[in-house]
Image (spheres, rainbow, N blue to C red):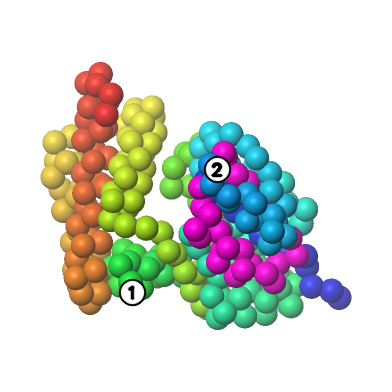
Amino acid sequence: MPSPALSACIITLNEADRIDACLDSLAFCDEIVVVDSGSRDDTRERARARGARVLERAFDGYRSQKDFAVRACRHDWVLCLDADERVTPALRAAIEAARAGGFADAAGYRFARATEYFGAFLRHGNAYPDRVLRLFDRRRGGFRGEREIHEHVEVDGRVVTLAGDLEHRAYRSLGDQLDRLQRYARLMAAHLHARGRRARWWNLVLNPAWRFMRGYLLRLGFLDGWRGFVYACVEANYVRQKFVMLWLLARGHAP
């Protein structure tokens, strides 16, 4: 019996400096779908040059954009990546082994994601293993729910963890990370506010402290040296921003 066909999908916006490596790591897939939301660089041209089918769609949320990409695929088994991610050889081998078995043992597969941070991969703390479910049968799952930020896949059925890492080369600089997390904080605050959540003063103090302690101490982020310390500090700041913005929204102020 032939192995199931496999689609890969990616959403993009101004990813010309990273899309090539991402697409190269997906060369084992039967098709690659790129959904672009108006790149002003040559992201689309680079994707087409590597054989991807490129679609254009106005961005209306991370979950909605990824759901559209999944539905645009020709095959039911789908591997979803971001443009700043790459399938490592070890992960590719694990995926191909599962595929050779017909993906018979699961409705979806998760694997560890390793984040590159200022020249080295973080291996501890909240950053690793950061297991993500990205390979799944779209007939039994997908990007569900209403939350457009911090979206994730849910499937009806068994989920199996594969060996190998997904490389995450997320941040071009500290400024890029801070800008991105501020945007995420604003989106999360708006989501929570719309659902009746309110921030209390202790959320502004205790929640960031807990995020730092959990990642840096309990999950051994300190073993990543100064990179682990900086990452934990920035994460804590993201949590503080989210609750400050939620606090302001409850008082009628735009964050």
Mark 2, secondary structure of its residue: loop
Above or below, 30 relative to 88 = above
232 or 86: nearer the viewer:
86
**x%, y% of residue 247?**
22, 30
Query: Callout 1, which amino acid?
Result: Ala
Q: Which of marks 2 and 1 is in front?
A: 2
Q: How far apart are marks 2 and 1 (CA)?
A: 29 Å
Q: What stretch is highlighted in magenta?
A: 14-39
On residue 39, the disc is 2
Residue 226, picture quadrant: bottom left
Above or below, 225 relative to 198 = below
Task: Give me the residue at 53% from left, 33% from top.
Answer: 60
Tell me which numbered mark, 2 or 1, is placed earlier along the sequence: 2
Residue 57 magenta: no
On residue 120, the disc is 1
Residue 167 lies left or right of residue 26; in this view the side is left
144 or 29: nearer the viewer:
29
